[in-house]
Image: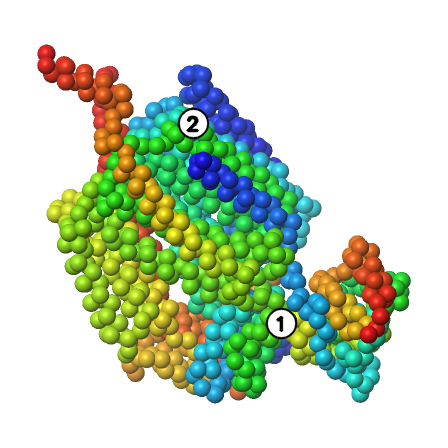
Amino acid sequence: MIRYLPLGGFVILLALLYFGLGNDPRNIPSPLVGKPVPVFSLPELYDPAKKVGSETMKGKVWMLSVWASWCVSCRAEHAVVSQFVKDTQLDVMGLNYKDESPDAKAWLSQFGNPYSLVAVDADGLVGIDSGVYGVPESYLVDKKGIIRHKFTGPINQKIVDDTLKPLVQTLRGETAS
Amino acid sequence: MRLLHTFMLLILLALSSAAQAGIEVRDFDNPEQREVYDKLMYELRCLVCQNENLAASNADLAKDLRDEVYEMLTQKKLSEAEIKKFLVDRYGDFVLYKPPVKKSTALLWAGPFILLLLGFVILFFVLRHNRRQPKVKLDNNKHDEIKKLLESEDK
Amino acid sequence: MIPELGHFSLILSLAMACVLGVLPLYGTFRGNANYIALAKPATYGMWFFVSISFACLVYAFVTDDFSVRYVVLTSNSALPLVYKVSAVWGAHEGSLLLWGLILTIWAAAVATFSRSIPSVMLARVLSVMGLIAIGFFLFVLITSNPFERVPMQADGRDLNPLLQDFGLAIHPPMLYTGYVGLSVAFSFAVAAMIGGKLDAAWARWARPWTNVAWVFLTIGIALGSWWAYYELGWGGWWFWDPVENASLMPWLVATALMHSLIVTEKRGMFKAWTVLLAIGAFSLSLLGTFLVRSGVLTSVHAFASDPARGLFILIFLALVIGLSLALFSARATKLSSSAKFEPLSKETGLLANNVILVVMASAVLLGTLFPLITDALADDKISVGPPYFNMIMVPLAVVLVIVMGMGLLLRWKSDHVARLASILWLPLVFAIVAAIVLPLIFAPSFDGLVFMGLLMSSWVAFTALMWIIKQKRSPFKLSGTSWGAMLGHIGLAVTFTGITLVSVYNVEKDIRVEPGDKYTIGEYEFGFDGVREIEGPNYTAFRGTINIKRNGKDFTVLHPEKRTYHVQTMPMTEAGIDAGFFRDLFVALGEPLEDKGAWSLRIQYKPFVRWIWLGAILMGLGGLFAAFDKRYHRLSRRRKIKQEEVV
């Protein structure tokens, strides 16, 4: 009986490694899912005197989109995100992460602005508070201000169709209190 | 031209995200505080790197996190546990190089010692099994060989 | 043309490998002497064609052939020649071809230096190596072809600046030689299981090959550690990174294998253990290959990950290890032995040694794979890093060290507590005294960790010395294996000493300096003399000047640099290091600060850090002494004389 032990152990190891092949070790799940959006209040990109933050979108289903003009992947997802916003009429607040405002404005005027509002997180502190570790990142927030889903990396059409659109619909069906 | 070149080099360095040591000059209230800082730098993971701690990484996020930890330690006077909790609340257990001891990591922490115990149990049983064997056992070939040798000597 | 020749040559070596893997093995079942006789020529043929293939790849690099995709990705016309050659194995495809080349070199060596091995056994051993080679060549040709062409490019993307170093020239070849060398022991084990007979003679054949492979692995790992130390700029020498662990695990198991072979040779015992360890050591080598190239774990060492390649290696792993373990299950009864030994005996000591080393390797495996396990079972991501591994491995090392000392001095078959105690008390006393007294010379106060670490090292060293003394012979009349054991154990003691002392007494300071500032650590005064800009062959750099005085007198000048390479513009730190037997001085440039030419600087005083690698060199030397013990060569000479007599 014992003689089959090494072979048995190896088969279990193989199964684990096979699982590992389909798995991305760098994609960290966020502990903030199910928790309220971290409280923040930042200047708006086009009107720095105005403050926008976690409370601004309360009562609506919205998306917090972390982006920067220096981020190449953000450009890759921009078309998909813009289309997604048009299709669903979703309110999106952009979080301009560790960027220069002139560069951010230039980027938006060149590639289009899907965001209802853009908060400027110049030093990245709100990013850290939200568990941001890469750009772009997107958070779907429900009417009560709870983060329901976090997506890291550029959004593609498949993710929009399979995950985001259905989730937005579900969240909109919920009550605000 | 030389000035421009030097300037550009400095800009490149400033924007660097290469994997080299994060050397910052820090002032602390006391040596114990510095020790806690050094310990945290060693135990906290740089999330955007390919497996480096905050002490070794020069990535932007690593620098921000170092500054944040420094501020929490010296300005807000948070303890080591509180700082770790702050980061784990936002980034999950992934940010700790020393995995927390909880149910899901029980196998990890207990595993090696269970293995050691298992090893000694196996050792014990092997020794006992060995003791129970008959004293001297020759296989048949050897037995015949010896018989032949003995018989040839008699001749 | 040359790349196509290289590609074609590789296909030919695959053909040779197929011949080698199938026909001689088949011949041993059918008693077909012609097929059996094919083993050696097929081996040499396989080696010949891979050598040509590899030479073609080197040629492509040296001549800047930017129509070859792999050259474009890893080289550049401005790259110094020595790095152009090293760049051949600087990335995935080329490093695999190097693996293949080294495999064929080992096989050719086995074919050449095995005069005393019966031809049936030798044919089986070579066939198994041929089968392994088939897997590797198929992998290269199908998924990782270094000879792939692209439209001619203007220039290449350059070698990663971190790899533009002497370390790349020696670390991977040494390490791969070790990894691949373990396939020899593996092949011997499989060949023996196929034949259904495993005895002391088999162990005598397998031992020198295993020892030499172990030597290369030891040196390869030490080189990696040393390279990381001086290259990465923060003075660390081991990070328990998955790829580092992937090299340590086979080393631990190979060490157990080396010791288990002693028992199998001397007493015809532990056959099942030895076979399992041989399979285990090579399996861990293959596992390491998988981990580095599949993207399953995050590592600074990882080659560009590709799940398709990962799948291929996984299937290869499944076949090689699965089949050999299945063979083990089938042949297990034939591997039992009838010799007896008392609970207090060298056999027990070596068995305990096997157990501990396997437990240590398993612990490293558990920690390395646990993030994957957590992900699979709990869908959560965790990190397992140096704090965990250090906490786990230190107690295990303590147990190992205790067993090492006792095991070395125990008698075969049966020993008595009284005798053992009489021989152990002296080394123990010496060890305790050394552990207390020696630190006092260097450090002001008692430190528990230092005491424990030095106690462990001294115990190992003094038991090794005691063992040599007890041989009651002139050192020059001692056998190679005796020297090997002593050097091997003392080498480990030296390494443990270095690890203990540098871990506890390391001094590290991050400071702000302006030109003219001075900083003192112990008897050394570091004077900052500003930073200049310089031009290198393919980089620009900021070069600092640190004048070091020792006890007031001029001692040395260090030049830490911060380089920016022209092509891959990632900045890189080159630390300024003054290497010494008892300590290293380590200076790294930080960042330029505001004005007045101020910079941040990291100064380190690292006592006994070189001992870590010095110990490894001693261990390697020990392994060589053991491998070239005259016993392994006497028999072949005797046979030769016999053959000549007959003629």
Percent across and percent down for residue B77 are 54, 85
Work out whether B89 lies above or below C3: below
Give the residue at x 38% y 80%: C526
Q: What is the residue that sits farthest to the top in this orientation?
A: B155
| In the rendered image, the vertical position of residue C561 relative to residue A23, given as above or below | below
| Type of amino acid under label 1 | Asp
The disc label shown at residue B89, or none: 1
Percent across and percent down for residue A120 are 75, 79
Label 1 vs label 2, nearer the camera: 1
Residue A47, position in %: x, y?
A: 82, 84
Q: Write down the residue under mark 2.
A: C194
Which of the image's four quarters has the C terminus of chain C? top left
The residue lying furthest to the left in this view is B154
Give the secondary structure at mark 1. helix
Q: Give me the disc on residue C635.
A: none
Between marks 1 and 2, how big is the CA–CA gap? 56 Å
Q: Nearer the viewer, residue C78 or C210?
A: C210
The residue nearer to you, when weighing A48 against C344, is C344
Left or right: C416, with C262 as reference point: left
Query: What amino acid type is highlighted by mark number 2?
Result: Ile
Can residue C636 be seen by looking at this rendering?
Answer: yes
